[in-house]
Image (spheres, helix red, strand yellow):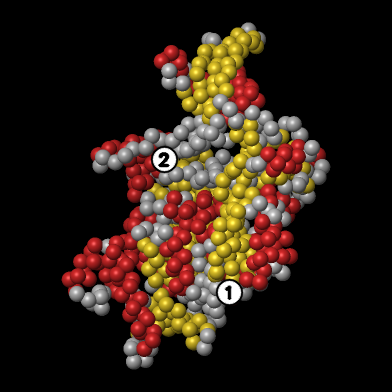
């Protein structure tokens, strides 16, 4: 009661009962969840689930999240995406477009377990948000449209989850649709994702309406309350009362046990010993499901209709049962002992609080005023305040414990993806301890030992760019500040300055990505910036192998700078994670010369090469598929690294002009879903866009076209396909690769870039 009086005095507003409940609940949750005085540490962490929701666009991620918050009691009323009033879609741009643009974290409780849940975007333009988030999660719910199965972006998020070794649950949403098909979905999971689906639920349909589900493990019929009714009714399936459902459930249970037994020897031995599938207990099945889910040898499949409020509570139960708690995935960080360790995975800029950094805590605790050290930036910073996230709302707390997600203020240099610790000394000790353990267990130790503590988020290369200009000189500094903040929030946004044109250039993942950036600059920073026409981000590659040398002798002040450098350009160079851009000549004379290069000189040479390959001779685009071999290097005493870097850059540019180059264009995988009557028109249109049609599939009442198309041919395609199909067709794209252009198309590309 005293707390309510305090709120009233502070805000001087009329308090509704819902407001009081909501405010009290948030603060009580924060207190019980994060106070070390109330619950033992080891007991707390077993009841934490750090999970993400990923899917193709419009599969129902945000709607499912909203239902979870409602059934957990965190919100009193369910919002809808089409009404623009959901908790996790809080940006103006998200509510206007009905899509998720930025990931949102929210903490809630279900059955005495704490869920730290992150709703992620589904649009390919914002895949970096998904990439950043997956790096700090313990498990993922992958949502499929029950009428569409595995779609284009589903493949992307699945590969991302596999790269971070995350256990998954698949949830078949929209099962209320007439064309929903669980068997088609399971078939597409097996075929496209390459993983064995274990169907744990069956749909219950009455009078052509989806009304409930059958739990295959427990052989129970589950019906859900309609509308805002949170009640969930369970009753045992009997052969007498539900003969068809009983038979289907029995068959599905046997199939699930058979599949599990293929991967779990203990369950297989239990089946052999009992001589019957019917004698296998529910606990045996659940234990086996936990094992195969965490080993990622198979994936549990559940179903429901989030919009119709069916199946969400069962999905939350499955998260508790099958997805791991934090210690299962962060044992490597126990080498920090009592020291703090965490990872930054998101940065936002709040008008009142300044920059806020989201941290996943892997070890120890983070407190207000604590000093932390970024391994990647090699910088120490002091934490301001510590918060718990509730989408775009934050509750201040004294500390956040191991296994949780914290939001901290006061950090100016730490970026998304940074691994942070209490100090550099603590990190070095932890690394040494981990290496000793690996050596003791005869495990392979990577060359880059820092990677032992997790891979950094992979930043995709931008494929579109455009110029941006402030409306006046007086707003230029404000625009620069806005772009700096947006780039820190979104590493897939690249901001550069073109010396030739004097323009600031934005590079992003797609048309929608850059459109959202421009909209945010206008609405959040109040700057009516002008964006130039959208351009495709082409690449160049060298044609011929050439070798040349450069000798530099110059005097700056009283210091003489002299060097001799000899290099070759290597075309058709396929760079992978184990192959450096700079190669060394290993002939005896040259190898002995190169062995004497000072490390600081080598760093300067690499920096010069990197800058030199940023601008090709034809259209000033970045040069790829090209390596450089260093044959000889001599530098006089006192020669500065800046001179060495400039010489390497100059020689690289000279080699590129001598070699000649060709242009590569980005091509994408395109998936178009359309009613059958428009498919011939769509195929005809794609043939004029230089598309290579790979397949035409049937999906329910629709047809799906799979094609590979040059990105330049898809500018404005969203408008064109709406006209062609009367607004009924949808499409999605995913970057595939850069490929060489024909001479005619190359001339067109040069004209589009140069203007002549």
Q: Quadrant of the C terminus?
A: top right
**Which residue is pictured at 54% across the width and 70% down the height?**
699
Residue 110 in view (yes/no) = no
**Above/below status of 220 relative to 353:** below
From the top left corner, tell me how far across and down residue 192 is, in percent. Answer: 46, 60
Mark identifier at residue 188? none
Rendered image: mark on residue 701: 1
Q: Earlier in the sequence, mark 1 or mark 2?
A: 2
Q: Give the labeled residue for mark 2.
A: 451
Q: Residue at x 54, y 10 (%)?
A: 636
Give the residue furthest to the bottom. 240
Q: Nearer the viewer, residue 222 or 146?
A: 146
- Position of 351 with respect to 132 (left or right) is right
Query: Marks 1 and 2: which is nearer the front?
Result: 1
Asked if the residue under mark 2 is in contact with the one under mark 1, i.e. CB atoms within 8 Å, the reply is no
- Seen from this angle, which residue lies furthest right? 472
329 is higher (above) or lower (below) than 426: below
Vertical side of 177 occupied by 517: above or below: above
The local secondary structure at tag 2 comes to helix
Q: Residue at the spot x=63%, y=7% of the render?
A: 558
Query: Of residues 653 and 573, which is closer to you in this image?
Result: 573
Instruction: State the residue at coordinates (41%, 49%).
Output: 362
Q: Quadrant of residue 262?
A: bottom left
* Camera-nearest residue between 211 and 318: 211
SS assignment at label 1: loop
Where is residue 359 drawn, in percent x and y?
49, 50
């Amino acid at each position: 009661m005293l707390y309510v009086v305090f709120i009233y005095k502070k805000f001087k507003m009329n308090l509704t009962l819902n407001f009081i409940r909501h405010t009290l609940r948030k603060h009580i949750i924060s207190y019980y969840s994060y106070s070390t005085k109330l619950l033992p540490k080891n007991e707390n962490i077993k009841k934490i689930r750090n999970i993400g929701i990923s899917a193709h666009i419009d599969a129902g991620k945000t709607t499912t999240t909203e239902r979870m918050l409602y059934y957990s009691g965190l919100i009193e009323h369910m919002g809808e995406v089409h009404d623009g009033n959901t908790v996790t879609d809080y940006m103006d741009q998200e509510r206007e477009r009905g899509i998720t643009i930025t990931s949102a974290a929210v903490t809630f409780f279900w059955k005495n377990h704490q869920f730290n849940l992150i709703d992620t975007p589904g649009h390919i333009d914002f895949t970096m948000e998904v990439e950043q988030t997956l790096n700090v999660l313990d498990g993922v719910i992958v949502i499929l449209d029950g009428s569409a199965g595995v779609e284009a972006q589903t493949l992307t998020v699945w590969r991302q989850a596999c790269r971070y070794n995350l256990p998954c649950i698949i949830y078949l949403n929209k099962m209320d649709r007439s064309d929903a098909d669980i068997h088609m979905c399971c078939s597409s999971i097996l075929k496209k994702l390459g993983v064995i689906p274990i169907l744990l639920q069956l749909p219950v349909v009455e009078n052509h309406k989806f009304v409930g589900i059958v739990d295959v493990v427990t052989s129970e019929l589950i019906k859900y309350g309609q509308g805002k009714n949170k009640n969930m009714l369970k009753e045992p399936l009997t052969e007498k009362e539900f003969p068809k459902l009983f038979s289907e459930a029995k068959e599905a249970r046997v199939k699930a046990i058979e599949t599990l037994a293929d991967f779990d020897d203990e369950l297989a031995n239990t089946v052999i010993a009992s001589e019957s599938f019917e004698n296998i207990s529910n606990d045996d099945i659940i234990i086996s499901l936990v094992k195969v889910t965490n080993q990622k040898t198979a994936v549990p499949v559940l179903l429901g209709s989030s919009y119709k409020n069916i199946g969400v509570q069962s999905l939350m139960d499955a998260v508790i049962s099958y997805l791991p708690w934090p210690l299962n995935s962060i044992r490597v960080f126990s080498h920090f002992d009592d020291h703090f360790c965490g990872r930054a995975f998101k940065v936002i800029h709040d008008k009142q609080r300044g920059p806020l950094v989201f941290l996943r805590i892997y070890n120890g605790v983070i407190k207000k005023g604590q000093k932390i050290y970024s391994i990647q930036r090699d910088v120490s910073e002091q934490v301001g305040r510590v918060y718990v996230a509730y989408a775009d709302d934050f509750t201040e707390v004294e500390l956040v414990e191991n296994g949780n997600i914290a939001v901290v203020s006061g950090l100016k240099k730490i970026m998304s993806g940074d691994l942070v610790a209490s100090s550099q000394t603590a990190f070095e000790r932890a690394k040494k301890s981990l290496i000793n353990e690996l050596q003791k267990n005869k495990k392979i130790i990577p060359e880059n030992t820092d990677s032992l503590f997790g891979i950094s988020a992979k930043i995709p290369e931008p494929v579109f760019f455009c110029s941006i200009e402030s409306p006046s000189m007086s707003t230029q500094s404000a625009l620069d500040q806005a772009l700096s903040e947006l780039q820190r929030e979104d590493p897939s946004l690249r901001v550069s300055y073109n010396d030739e044109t004097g323009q600031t250039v934005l590079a992003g993942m797609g048309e929608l990505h850059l459109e959202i950036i421009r909209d945010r600059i206008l609405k959040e920073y109040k700057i009516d910036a002008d964006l130039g026409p959208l351009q495709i981000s082409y690449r160049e590659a060298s044609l011929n192998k050439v070798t040349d040398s450069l000798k530099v002798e110059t005097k700056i002040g009283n210091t003489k700078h002299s060097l001799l450098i000899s290099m070759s350009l290597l075309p058709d160079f396929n760079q992978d994670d184990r192959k450096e851009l700079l190669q060394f000549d290993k002939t005896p004379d040259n190898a002995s010369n190169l062995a004497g290069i000072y490390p600081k000189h080598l760093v300067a040479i690499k920096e010069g090469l990197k800058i030199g390959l940023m601008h090709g001779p034809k259209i000033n685009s970045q040069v790829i598929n090209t390596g450089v071999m260093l044959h000889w290097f001599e530098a006089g005493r006192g020669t500065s690294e800046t001179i060495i870097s400039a010489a390497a850059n100059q020689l690289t540019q000279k080699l590129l002009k001598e070699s000649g180059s060709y242009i590569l264009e980005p091509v994408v995988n395109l998936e178009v879903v359309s009613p059958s009557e428009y498919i011939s028109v769509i195929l005809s249109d794609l043939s004029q866009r230089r598309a290579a049609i790979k397949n035409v599939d049937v999906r329910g009442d629709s047809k799906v076209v799979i094609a590979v198309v040059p990105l330049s041919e898809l500018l404005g395609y969203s408008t064109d396909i709406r006209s062609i199909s009367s607004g009924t067709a949808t499409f999605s794209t995913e970057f595939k690769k850069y490929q060489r252009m024909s001479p005619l198309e190359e001339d067109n590309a040069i004209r589009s870039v140069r203007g002549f």
